[in-house]
Every structure is written in structure tokens, then in C-alpha cells.
Image: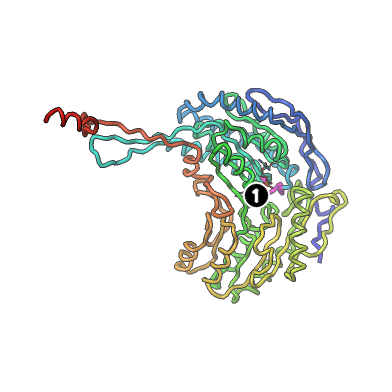
Amino acid sequence: MTTPVSTSMRTSARSAYVPAAPYEQLIGADWIAGTGTFEAIDPSTGQPWATLPQGSARDVDEAVRAARAAQRAWGRTTLDQRQTVLLAIADRFEEQGERFAPLLATENGRPIREAHLADLPTVCAIFRFFAGVVRSLNGEQIPVADPETLVYTRREPIGVVAAVLSWNSPLITLSNKLAPALAGGNTVVVKPSEYATASVLEFLRLVADLLPPGVVNVVTGVGPETGAALVGHPDIAKITFTGGPATARAILGAAAQTLTPSLMELGGKSAMIVAEDADLERAVEDALMGIYLANGEACIAASRLLVHEKVHAEFVERFAATARRIRVGDALDPATEVGPLVSARQLELVRGHLDRARAEGVRFVTGDEPLDLPQDLADGYFQRPVLLADDDGGSTISGTEVFGPVTVVQKYRTDEEAVARANSTPYGLAAGVWTSDLRRAHTVAAQLEAGIVWVNRWFDLAPGMPMGGVGESGFGRELSLETLREYTAVKSVNIGLGLQRFPLWGQARSEEQGQ
Ligand code: NAD
């Protein structure tokens, strides 16, 4: 069976994003070209749509210098002033951000309906959240034993933050790093993904006048050149990274040389447990959203579904019935539910995982049929939504992050077995349980080894809720008050209030003299 996607079903004419001006990097107050260029490809058509600057190590050095020069003054701004700037960024984006929906769809294949529903409002919500909590950026008064001692802490800026971004939700990832770093009084050098650079440059074009020059800088280009130059720069005070574990290892290697602290948001193979007493209809709906939102290119994707044997057959039937009807097509089409993968490389990777699963005998419940796409999308990077069945979870794909619209359903008998399987990968980003039993919900939530646990829902990331993983999913937390602490340094101030000091030095001599 094939998904009936045809030109006649498409509700809008294709209208790719057209840049208003050549793309340049932002260094200090200046927009500058790179030493070379590279092409941005529209993943729906496989055609180039923009030319982007390739930054050099020298550009990186100048950006870090600009950020250092701006840091002193920005670090001295009051919390009130930082709050005003963060709110102004959110307001500006809310007023003028609509055009970022077609931009995201053109840039990384994000279905345009999701860009409207998720990306744009989330950017505003993140900046407003940090505009609020910046007023809580206080130190503490520390109780100590000696009544004549006053100890308190100050939360101070750390300096220049290097923000290295992934491509899958570029504006949300940018906001997750920029808002708390600025709230903490730091300046920033951003290195967007080479697959999602334009949206980050456009965002900075939109809001740059709200910030003093040098407070935010953007250098662009491929990871091993521009990215490596940035994370290895000796004047970086903190690295904040979103991406894959292999890149994280390379970055941490560089950070080890300069002893630079890091925040790492990495991948996942997140397990949703569906117990026998779950509300099956809602569990299926959230499982579909959990894997197919953002074309399955989400770090928190529900890419493993552990379903109790008593409800397994019904769950699989319901899930597959909807998965087969999902409309795959042009990311710019508002009717599209799953768009193309970000790049030819990503499609190749996903297909490689599927080929291996097939060779290992994993059953395709749905998604193994060719796509019937219109001629203008023939060179796009499309993958039909897949549901695989691997009852005991023993296949390679059951333990590997695919980063595409592919999920694996497994069968379990006891809660202990479900928890053990959920915890069996090196990742630990998200996990969840569907149940109507309160005791089971709390018990399983406590036992799951993950930074985020959802009960009777998936994908909800309310600003304020710390977001991050354990194990190979990384360390550090975004999106929360916790995050403000990530971007500040604690200084302890210890004040002696009394005049008395126990005499420690020269006592032997005075005793001798007294004899
Ligand atoms: P990636 O690791 O390939 O690239 C991420 C960034 O690192 C890019 O900007 C890239 O240019 C840069 N980079 C590459 N090599 C570098 C080097 N040697 N030094 C410095 N920078 C370098 O990841 P990706 O393909 O962009 O994103 C997909 C991965 O990100 C997936 O594993 C996904 O799970 C993860 N992810 C995690 C989260 C989260 O919050 N936990 C969110 C989104 C994506």
C-alpha cells in the first residue's frame, strides 16, 4: 500500500524562502562575509536555495575578541536591564517571526504546520521564561557555625559562551542557549549547524539592534573547521552544545586542553512504556506524535514503544492504521504531516539502519513501501513513517538512535521487565509510562534512568521544567532555573564580623619569653 501523496492533493503552490540579502556572519557590530561559501539545500527538492558564509579560524578569533570586549559592560547590566532586553527579543519575534515558518521548512524540512505550532511560540516562551527568572538570579546567605562569620554567595557571569547548535530545531536550540547565557550576564559566540544556518542568521538580523554590539556574534561553517576553532579557543569560558555523542567526544577532547566547562545535550533512544491499564487511544496518539513530530528528527523522540503483551496487538493495529495515513510531502505544504529528512546524508543513514533491521529479520509493520511523490519532489529526502516490531528488543535498531520517522514496538510482561529494557541503552534523555495506576506511575518514574519522565503524555516541555539527559544523552540542564546556574559562577564571600581571632602563630616564642 502506498500513501496517496499526489500533486493534486497539495494545497499550496511551493514557495521556498527567498533571502532578502546575502548571508553574512555577525562579528561585533559588523556583518561580514566568510573566507568561502557553502550551499544550503532545500530538502524537499534537493535543490540549493541559499549561499552561506564559511567562517575561518580568524573569523572565530575576531568573534571571540568582540564577545570578550563586550562582556564587561554586559556583565554589569542590572537584572532589570537584561530582563527588558530578553522581553524585547520575544516581542520582536512574536511580531515579526511569521516568516520564519517558511524559512524553517525550506531550511531543514520542518513541516510548516509544526513550525507555526511549535517552533515559533516556543522561541517566545523561552525568552520570556528567562526574562522572568533572571530576577531570581540571587546568591544565598549560608548559615555557618560561627556567629561572627557572615557567608554569602554571588552569582556572577562566566564570560564568553560558545554555543554550538544542531540542525533539527535551530531556533529553539538557539533560544535554549542564548536566553540563559544573556540572562547570566555573558556574551555569546554562536556556531549554527551547517544544515540550519540561515534561520540563526535571520534571527540575529531581526534582533541585533536590541543588544549592544559584540554581545552576540555568529560564525558559520562546517563543524570540523569553524566549530573546532571555536570550541578550542582559549578565551571561551563555557561550551554549550547540542548534537550527537561522537561530536560531543571531539568537543570534550578540545575542552580538556583548555579546561573549559561544558553543557552537553546529546541524543536518545527514549522508551515509552504502555501498561495494560493505559488509556490506549491517548497512548497511541502520543506515541504517533512522539515519533513523527519533527519528522522523527528529535532528540526526545519516542523511538522505542514497550507495550504490555495484553494490549500489544491492539496498540500496534491502531498505531499502524494511522501511521499508514500520514501525509508525507513538501515541508512548505500546510497539509504535510511528515516532511523530508534534513539531508541526503541523513536519509542515507536512516536507510542504512532500516536495511540492517531488515537483514536481522525485524518485521516492518508499516513503512516498507515506496513513496509515490510528485515529480517536483523526486530529488527530496523523503522517508515514509515506519513502525518496526521487535518483540524482545534484541535487534540493533532497538538500541540505536535513528533520528528519523522510525520507531520500534516491543512486547513485555512485567513492570520490572519493561523498566530493565527501557534502561538498557547507554542513553538516558527521556522515558515515559502510560498507566491509570498511580502507584505504578510513581514507581516506574522513579526507576527509569532518564533526565525526563512523562506519565500519560509525551513531548511536553514546559519552560521551567529542567531538560537534559544522563549517560550518553549528556549533562547539564536547559529550559529552567537550573540553567541560569549553568551560566553563572558562584563566588563565596566570607566576612569576619568579630574582632577575636584564636592566636595561632608565635605562641611558642611568647611562652618561652614568659618563662
Ligand atoms: P552533530 O553532532 O553532527 O553536529 C552538531 C554541531 O556540532 C553542528 O553545529 C556541527 O557543525 C558541530 N560540529 C561538528 N563537528 C565539530 C567539531 N569537531 N568541533 C566543534 N563543532 C563540531 O549533530 P547534528 O547532526 O547537528 O544533530 C543531531 C544530533 O543532535 C542527534 O544525536 C540528536 O539526538 C542530538 N540532539 C540533541 C538534542 C538535545 O537537546 N538533547 C536536541 C537536538 C538534537
Rendered-image quadrant of the C terminus: top left
- Kind of element beneath mark 1: loop
x then y, percent, for residue 14: 81, 44
x then y, percent, for residue 313: 65, 74
Residue 172 visible: no
Rendered-image quadrant of the N terminus: bottom right
Q: Nearer the viewer, residue 351 or 239?
A: 239
Q: Nearer the viewer, residue 148 or 136?
A: 148
- Residue 16: image quadrant is top right
The CB of the residue at mark 1 lies under 8 Å from ligand 1: yes
Instruction: Identify the colour scheme used.
Output: rainbow
**How many numbered circles does the render carry?**
1
Q: Nearer the viewer, residue 194 or 338?
A: 194
Single out the residue that lies furthest toward the left: 515
The secondary structure that most of the magenta stretch takes on is helix
- Residue 302: image quadrant is bottom right
Residue 180 visible: yes
Residue extent of the magenta highlight: 110-115
- Residue 326: image quadrant is bottom right
The residue tagged 1 is 244
x then y, percent, for residue 28: 63, 24
Mark 1 Cα-neighbour bin, 10 Å: few <14, some 14–19, many ≥20: some
Q: Nearer the viewer, residue 234 or 98?
A: 234
Q: Residue at x 50, y 68 (%)?
A: 436
Is 459 in the magenta? no
Q: Residue at x 67, y 65 (%)?
A: 408
Amino acid on which the number 1 mark rests in the picture: Gly
Taking 270 as reference, is 307 above or below it? Answer: below
x then y, percent, for residue 319: 67, 66
Q: Residue at x 71, y 37 (%)?
A: 225
